[in-house]
Amino acid sequence: MAKVLGLGGLFFKSADPAATRDWYNRVLGIAGDEWGAFFTPDLAAAHPGAGTVFSPFSAETDYFAPSDKEFMFNLMVDDLDGMLAQAAAAGVEPVKLFPDEGNGRFAHLMDPEGRKIELWEPKPYQP
């Protein structure tokens, strides 16, 4: 049987794509061009425990709040504290911080168009 290898891309509509690209570059360091940013698998592979999660949530979940979107981005980061400091320097504060969990550390931010971003610093996988 053929298998899905992971997330091949994340594509979304934006009222102002250039400003949105600029925000993601300034706040999260995601540099790209008009086509977007390209992440190679070796970046995640260098961090044991990192991977792609595909998970439908209940339509009634409030986990994505305060966003009213039907989705949330989860971005793997190598240094959550450093990423939060970088975001704060750009004037962006987290809407939620989480205690350390078995699979890593998490924080939530909102982008300027109301999309929730979950930042995840993975811990090495322990079966």
Image (tube, helix red, strand yellow):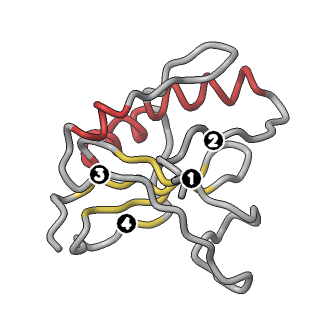
Circles 2 and 1: CB distance less than 8 Å?
A: yes
Circles 3 and 2: CB distance less than 8 Å?
A: no
Label whose residue precedes the other's in the sequence (1 or 3): 3
Q: Residue furthest front?
A: 1
Amino acid type, callout 2: Leu
Location of mark 3 (residue): 50
Residue at disc 2, secondary structure: loop
Label whose residue precedes the other's in the sequence (3 or 4): 3
Q: Position of residue 88 (x, y in %)?
A: 40, 41
Q: Position of residue 81 (x, y in %)?
A: 25, 47
Counting other residues with Cα less than 10 Å from the Cα at mark 3, is it few (<14), some (14-19), or many (20 or more)?
many
Left or right of 10, for residue 52? left
Residue drawn at the location 56% of the way across and 39% of the way down: 8
Q: Position of residue 52 (x, y in %)?
A: 43, 54
Amino acid type, callout 1: Phe
Task: Indicate which label's residue lies in the foreground, 1 or 3.
Answer: 3
Location of mark 2 (residue): 10
Counting other residues with Cα less than 10 Å from the Cα at mark 4, is it few (<14), some (14-19), or many (20 or more)?
few
Q: Is residue 78 above or below residue 65?
A: above
Residue at disc 4, secondary structure: strand
Label whose residue precedes the other's in the sequence (3 or 2): 2
Task: Indicate which label's residue lies in the foreground, 2 or 1.
Answer: 2
C-alpha gap between disc 2 and disc 1: 9 Å
C-alpha gap between disc 4 and disc 1: 16 Å
Residue drawn at the location 67% of the way across and 53% of the way down: 115
Location of mark 1 (residue): 73
Counting other residues with Cα less than 10 Å from the Cα at mark 1, is it few (<14), some (14-19), or many (20 or more)?
some
